Image: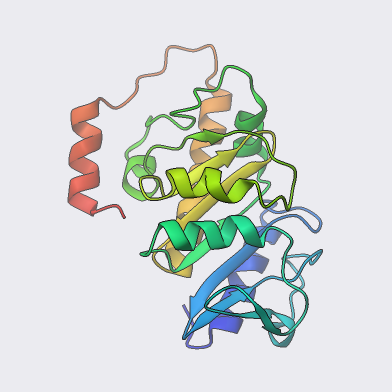
Amino acid sequence: MTADPREALCRWAKSLFDRGLSPGSSGNITCRFEDGFLATPTNSCLGFLDPQRLSVLDAEGRHLSGDKPTKELPLHLAYYRARPSAGAVVHLHSTYATALSCLADTDPEDAIPPITPYIAMRVGRVPVLPYTHPGSANVAPLIENRAADHAAVLLANHGPVVAGTSLDSAVFAAEELEETAKLLVLTRGLAVRRLDEATVAALQSLYRLR
């Protein structure tokens, strides 16, 4: 991550956009800095952010300067409240993770089962939260109820929300979630070999997933 958090946020946002993980004006990112937060502005495209126009928020999430923040701020702030280790939160509409959030037979307690070691190492178990409309404050208690034990969730019929201890780690985890979701969709109906619980526990202990 670069020394300037504004530049770092815009760099990662463009990377996600350029690889098709956040089409159009979808997706939003926040990160902690000093005594508050940086956030992507509402209705902005992650591929074309201006570092000087990012939303600056105080520690309570009040808008201080820059453009108006993303309407999804309630879900971001809920993650920070429930997960003190979170240094950044990434919400995407990435194709395969969003597809799993729409499928009726996705396990609501384990939407992204561990078929590779990396999802266990970087993300952990991913529950599906009940549907709320985009920007709804009603998502906050749903996230607060699960965020302490889960670094990522799927919003039903909407997409993934991923927290990390830093901006880099949150983006890496969001990417890993999407890649594993892609593998799961591609192998649907096939006899997939999952990692067993002991292996998953060993990976998470070794890599100290937070």
Q: Residue at x 37, y 32 (%)?
A: 114
- 187 relative to 26, above or below: above
- 148 relative to 6, above or below: above
Q: In this view, does 194 lie to the left or right of 42?
A: left
Q: Residue at x 79, y 67 (%)?
A: 44
Q: Name the foreground residue: 106 vs 81.
A: 81
Q: Residue at x 60, y 55 (%)?
A: 75
Percent position of residue 160, x then y: 58, 45
Percent position of residue 113, x then y: 41, 29
Q: Residue at x 45, y 44 (%)?
A: 145
Q: Name the foreground residue: 64 vs 166.
A: 64
Image quadrant holding the C terminus, namely bottom left
Percent position of residue 148, x then y: 37, 50
- 126 relative to 188, above or below: below
Percent position of residue 162, x then y: 51, 52
What count of labels does the image hold? 0
- 90 relative to 110, above or below: below
